[in-house]
Amino acid sequence: MKIQLRRWGNSLGLRVPQKIAQNYGLDENSLVELTETPEGIMIQKRSRVSSLDELLSSIPDDFEYPEDTREFNESGSVGEELI
């Protein structure tokens, strides 16, 4: 598929055809990563950033801190820290 590049400020832009956008779940708010490779340019959809709640909920119930950080994580506050 041939796509013509267009000037966008000091850069060049390209349009992603609707069918390709749909196939890869892209929309106007999607983030993509552009990587130079020996073969050419690779465009990959980036995962959206997880919220703090999503990250915390992904921690397994049986999670244990590694031995080298356990004492720090289990110690109480010693000043006016907000935990």
Image (cartoon, rainbow, N blue to C red):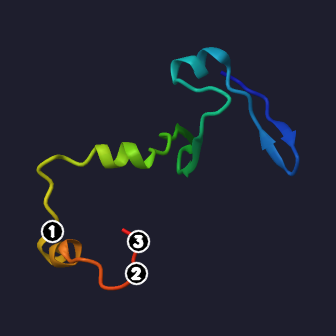
Residue at the image position 59 percent from the left and 40 percent from the top: 31
Name of the residue lying farthest toward the top: 19
Q: Is residue 41 visible?
A: no
User: Residue at label 3?
Assistant: 82
User: Residue at label 2?
Assistant: 80
Nearest the camera: 45 or 82?
Answer: 82
Spot occupied by residue 60 in the image (x, y as percentages of width and height): 18, 46
| Picture quadrant where residue 81 is located | bottom left
N-terminal label among 3 and 1: 1
Q: Is residue 3 left or right of residue 76?
A: right
Give the quarter of the figure containing the N terminus: top right
Cβ atoms at labels 2 and 3 below 8 Å apart? yes
**SS under mark 1:** loop
Rounded to the nearest angstrom, the CA distance separating label 2 from label 3 is 6 Å
User: Residue at label 1?
Assistant: 66
Spot occupied by residue 14 in the image (x, y as percentages of width and height): 74, 33
Seen in the picture, residue 2 relative to 83 is either above or below; the reply is above
Nearest the camera: 40 or 50?
Answer: 50
Seen in the picture, residue 57 relative to 18 is either above or below; the reply is below
**SS under mark 2:** loop
Please state which amino acid type lies under the numbered disc 2: Glu
Rounded to the nearest angstrom, the CA distance separating label 3 from label 1 is 23 Å
